[in-house]
Image (cartoon, helix red, strand yellow):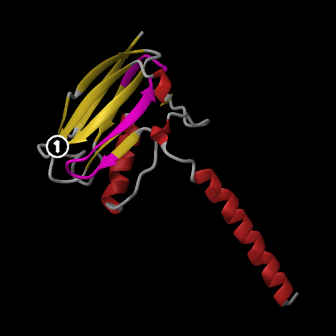
Amino acid sequence: MPMTLCSIRSTGLGLLTALALSTGALASGSHAGGHAHTGDEKAYGKPGVATRVSRTVTVDMTDAMRFTPSGITVRKGETIRFIVKNSGQIRHEFSLGSQRELAEHAAAMQKFPNMEHDEPNMVSLAPGVQGEVIWQFTQPGKVDFACLQPGHFESGMKGRVTVTR
């Protein structure tokens, strides 16, 4: 059946409506605003609520491809505010995840080095800038963190959170 101007407008309007509805779900606001997102829970925890922070841990990132501290211990159920500082001269990021997730994301960053992030378990920072990640650790075990900028993960810019009972 041939497309008429009316059917083209109708199809176009339907696509625009679907696009508008789907982008509303993606544009969910600032993660530092202190709210957890439904569906963001991972095996190692979930986005924390700013008003329920148990304590603050400062993490420094340097061009020596290291985090200080690289080992952090928390208790199950604790909500931690990570104040992350980039003391280097190049971009770094702090990303919480499983070893598999971090390795996969590092590989993706090799292909797309200018990838932008808006996820509650990570922060990407320009030189001299600081940011934060608020995370609630809901299960005991090990949670890794790493810088996923191209070459940084491979150079050993990694750390670990140990979650105790």
- Identify the residue at horizontal 57%, vertical 37% (top origin): 37
Horizontal and vertical percent position of residue 73: 30, 17
Asked if residue 97 shows in the view, the reply is no
Label 1: element kind: loop
In the picture shown, does residue 57 fall above or below 32?
Answer: above
The residue that mark 1 highlights is 87
Q: Quadrant of the rendered structure where residue 143 is? A: top left
Q: Quadrant of the rendered structure where residue 115 is? A: bottom left
Left or right of 144? Residue 156 is: left
Horizontal and vertical percent position of residue 86: 22, 44
* Front in this rendered view, residue 18 or 49: 49
- Identify the residue at horizontal 79%, vertical 83% (top origin): 8
In the picture shown, does residue 8 fall above or below 113?
Answer: below
Horizontal and vertical percent position of residue 72: 28, 22
Residue type at tag 1: Ser
Quadrant for the N terminus, please. bottom right
- Identify the residue at horizontal 62%, vertical 58% (top origin): 23
Quadrant for the C terminus, please. top left
- Which residue in the rendered view is the most extreme toward the left? 64
Q: Quadrant of the rendered structure where residue 121 is? A: top left
* Front in this rendered view, residue 33 or 150: 33
Q: Which residues make up the magenta segment?
A: 124-142
- Which residue in the rendered view is the most extreme toward the top? 165
Q: Is residue 63 magenta?
A: no
- Identify the residue at horizontal 49%, vertical 45% (top origin): 30
